[in-house]
Amino acid sequence: MPGALVHVANVLYLFSYLARDILWLRILTVVAASCLIPYFWLRPEPLVAPIAWNVIFTAINLVQIVRLLLERRPVVFTPAEQRLHQLVFRRLTPQEAKRLLAFARWADAAVGERVVAHDVWLDRLLLIDRGRLGVEIDGQRVAELHDGQFVGEMGFVSDSVTCADVVALAPTRFVWWPRTELQTFLDRDAGLRAAIELILGVDLASKLRPAHASSAETRVESG
């Protein structure tokens, strides 16, 4: 009987190596190690060193299994969080989006309120939930921002100061992240950082496209 345990353990290890899901790999590894421990213990002379190492490996895998199960729990969004996930953060998993929105702050701006001033180092990144903001340079409106668009993303990416004022054109609700906290959060996860930078890049490109189109139309008309 003890001799059969080593064969069962190795078959389980074989299946764990074939598993594509890291959770199943760890579960099969724990079960395999649980078969090896009595095998080593029931030897005529118990092999203490292999038993100790398998106990350590089993403990590590059990901790990782718990962590994976917690990460895979169904995510419950508030209606506002669900809206932003669908509107802006579809590239993120629900778990990633929930983590990102968990430390965000919510705020409201009344009509005419200046949300961002020019020539300042903006200490936060903003995202419009509902409303309308105007981008003004020297008192002239050059663009409008709407639901699902970021404010301050250029400064966040390039670490530069703002170049325009941003004023509420309608009652506006937005979410914002402290810049340093967001940087620290993204530094812990390279994959999430890359996804956020891509989202910001797409947002910035969508804002620049109308400006380029307007410039092209002006050149055609003047020509």
Image (cartoon, rainbow, N blue to C red):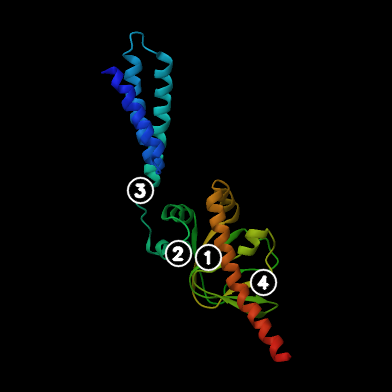
Q: Nearer the viewer, residue 214 or 150?
A: 214
Q: Mark 3 highlights which residue?
A: 73
Determine whether label 1 and label 4 are within 8 Å by CB. no
- Give neighbour class at mark 1: few <14, some 14-19, many 20+ (Cα, 10 Å): many
Query: Where residue 113 sits: x, y (%)?
Result: 57, 73
Q: Is residue 164 above or below residue 42?
A: below
Q: Quadrant of residue 57?
A: top left
Determine whether label 1 and label 3 are within 8 Å by CB. no
Query: Helix or strand or loop: what does disc 3 sit on?
Result: loop
Determine whether label 2 and label 1 are within 8 Å by CB. yes
| Labelled disc at residue 164 | 4
Determine whether label 2 and label 4 are within 8 Å by CB. no
On-image quarter of the N terminus: top left
| Mark positioned earlier in the residue sequence (2 or 1) | 2
Three-letter amino acid code at the position of disc 1: Leu
| Mark positioned earlier in the residue sequence (1 or 3) | 3
In front: label 3 or label 4: 3
Q: Nearer the viewer, residue 213 or 129?
A: 213
| Mark positioned earlier in the residue sequence (3 or 4) | 3
| Labelled disc at residue 84 | 2
Question: Is residue 177 visible in this depiction of the protein?
Answer: yes
- Give neighbour class at mark 3: few <14, some 14-19, many 20+ (Cα, 10 Å): few
